[in-house]
Image (cartoon, rainbow, N blue to C red):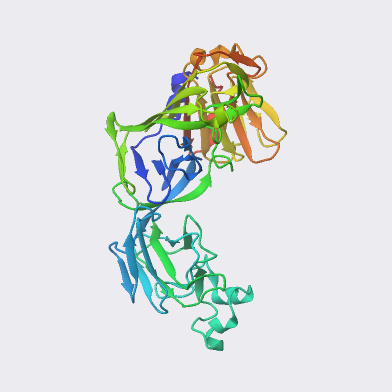
Amino acid sequence: MTLPALLSLFGNAGDLTLRRRYGSTEVYDIVQDFGDGYFYSVPLTGADNETIAAGAEWMRLGPLYLHRTYKAYADNSAGVTLSGTWTQAGSNSYQVSGRLAFSGNTGDYLELTTDDDVTSVGAVFRYGTSGGGLVKVTIDGDATLADLLETAQDKVNSGDFPNTILVANGGTLNPTDRVIDTYSDELFNGNLFSSSLTAGVHTVRLTVTGYKIAASASANCLFHAFIAYGAGLYTPAETLFHLWPVVNLMTTESYPTWEISHNVIPDGATTPEWIGHTNSMKFIDLPVLTVDGVETSLSKGAKTTGSNIVFAMGYGARHSEIDGGATNTALVDFTWTFNSTNGMTIAHTLTWLMDGTLSLGYPGMMALNTTFDRGRGRITTVDDLDDDNNARKCNHSGNTILMWDYDGEMGALMYVPDLAMTVNNYAETPTYQFAIDDDSSGIWNKARLYRFGQVHNFVTDEVWQSEINYRMKRFTDGANVALAPWSAL
């Protein structure tokens, strides 16, 4: 049970795909094949949806998702036909496809003929607009096959629409017709129509009905893309694809704390604030992106593949009581490295520009959802993480910690290559070292790595550094079978 063997156990294979998403916000996705049609992705996004620019808030790593990857089809893609009068436009701000097609004319439709072996279909509509109407969905000419959607009768029964939309009362819809209200039912990530189709070629049609609820400004169908899933359908060569989450492997927090989290009071301030949380860091040096050692830039909608993807950037840390948050209290350089075999490594160097006091300091955390219900540190037994007793478990002063799903496939490893650099060999953390917080909320189980577990007075030009490696893997024979025998080293 050596450290190299443990790291090798978590080794994955296959190139990474890096995509810069279409849409109004700045988002990148790192995607890797997890086997059996599953992919994982980590989104990198401008904090609070800000543009990534000098003076803007820092770029954040979002939650880690396990996905099915759907092929996407825009209005101008092969296999898509339009009937009637549609307005069609292209813009990098349009979600998924960089395209928008819309019509409010009753009877107008868009139709997709899918690739072969498709078992699941859906669409992405314009989200959060003032208009949007009721759209009829048929699959293979059958108005009842979109079984993940409500029927026209359901819409009448709920009071959303009057019974006059039904044929029996002079309308155009049968009670069993499947429909979607693109004003109130549409979801940001899209809507699935059916996920239980027989594998094969399918025809999906979206028909404008002309009906809308009173709150909607129009009966338009505002369309970005069809999405379709089938085993083996997606390959990295696809120009358009859409990530459909199967499970968020992280917490329900919007931005789990992969990176640093230091609670500080710089001289001149009275209230502690976190570095690593909202409004705490502003861009100085914009991200420099390299793929397999070559500096790269991507326009929206573009993607590339490689085995080693690096983002390097620099920030100024701020405190709201120091010059109203306009003056840097520290300089922070980050490097995020995504490797096809070795997972994700986050390194940082923080240089203080003034004196101050810190009460708690974490160089990194791994906040996983509660399906990760077992943990093991540098101990001889496995700790149970599913009793939500707000206890810190797996406490130890080693350089690895394991978490896994006892009756599932997913396992996670957090590894510190250099304890002296990252945690000062735990010299300043007498109470806690490396631990898993079994939170009483039942929302997450979080591995916490402490550099400072008590008050520390820092001085100008003091430098803190860290490097932490995170790995995730599906163990198809069971995570507990693979990981319970290990004692993390």
Front-most of 392 and 293? 293
* 455 with respect to 340 (left or right): right
Q: Residue at left 63%, top 76%?
A: 157
Q: Residue furthest right?
A: 389
* 245 with respect to 253 (left or right): left
Q: Residue at left 46%, top 43%?
A: 50
Give residue 255's position: percent from left, percent from top: 54, 39
Q: Residue at left 53%, top 70%?
A: 216
* 393 with respect to 177 (left or right): right
Q: How many marks?
A: 0
Give residue 5's position: percent from left, percent from top: 45, 22
Give the answer, above or below, for where 467 lies relative to 64.
Answer: above
Q: Is residue 119 visible?
A: yes
Q: Is residue 380 visible?
A: no
Q: Residue at left 55%, top 42%?
A: 254
Give the answer, above or below, for where 163 lies relative to 453.
Answer: below
* 218 with respect to 451 (left or right): left
Give residue 395's position: percent from left, percent from top: 64, 21
Front-most of 416 and 21? 21
Give residue 224's position: percent from left, percent from top: 39, 61
Quadrant of the image occupied by residue 15 = top left
